[in-house]
Amino acid sequence: MILPILTIAASPNRGRGVFAMELIPAGTTVETAPVIVLNPEERAKVEATQLYNYVFEWGEDNRSAAVALGYASIYNHSKLANCKYEMDFDFQTIAIITLQPIGIGEELFINYNGEGGDDPNWFDIY
């Protein structure tokens, strides 16, 4: 499920990103994306490809990976994210939920380190 009020567009200095076409209230689930789970051996192979930039760590031990379908892998990172993601390991989905109101034309961001995470990443942190 992806709300039809989202679109993918060019994001300054980031390639593509997800943007709001309408005002979105805080606490709104804007997407629930199914994932394809990769075991640790498959994850190692994917990490040697361009897909490395689009997978989520997966599982209680973070040894597996998940390729999220829909827009979920296109949300850009911010330490001051306006959305969070929640993983459902049983149903193999990732939900994107707004943390604050999102204005028309505003980009939606998640923190790649998880909610409140501020660990350094392999890329420049915005």
Image (tube, grey):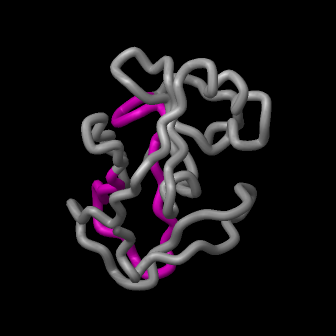
Above or below, comparing residue 55 to residue 27 in the picture:
above
Residue drawn at 24 percent across, 71 percent down? 25
Magenta-drawn segment: 95-117
Quadrant, the N terminus: bottom left
Q: Count the marks: how many? A: 0
Residue drawn at 40 percent across, 56 percent down? 33
Residue 82: x percent and y percent?
39, 55
Instruction: Examine the residues drawn in magenta and state their main secondary structure.
Output: loop
Residue drawn at 38 percent across, 84 percent down? 22
Q: In the shown orientation, is residue 25 left or right of residue 57?
A: left
Quadrant, the C terminus: top right
Q: In the shown orientation, is residue 31 left or right of residue 29?
A: right
Above or below, comparing residue 121 to residue 112 in the picture:
above
Q: In the shown orientation, is residue 1 left or right of residue 122?
A: left
Residue 110: x percent and y percent?
45, 48
Q: Is 64 included in the stretch rendered in magenta? A: no
Question: Which of 83/85 is in front?
Answer: 85
Question: Which of 7/78 is in front?
Answer: 7
Residue drawn at 47 percent across, 31 percent down? 113
Residue 18: x percent and y percent?
53, 67
Above or below, comparing residue 17 to residue 120 in the picture:
below
Q: Is 96 included in the stretch rendered in magenta? A: yes
Q: In the shown orientation, is residue 52 left or right of residue 112?
A: right
Question: Which of 44/84 is in front?
Answer: 44
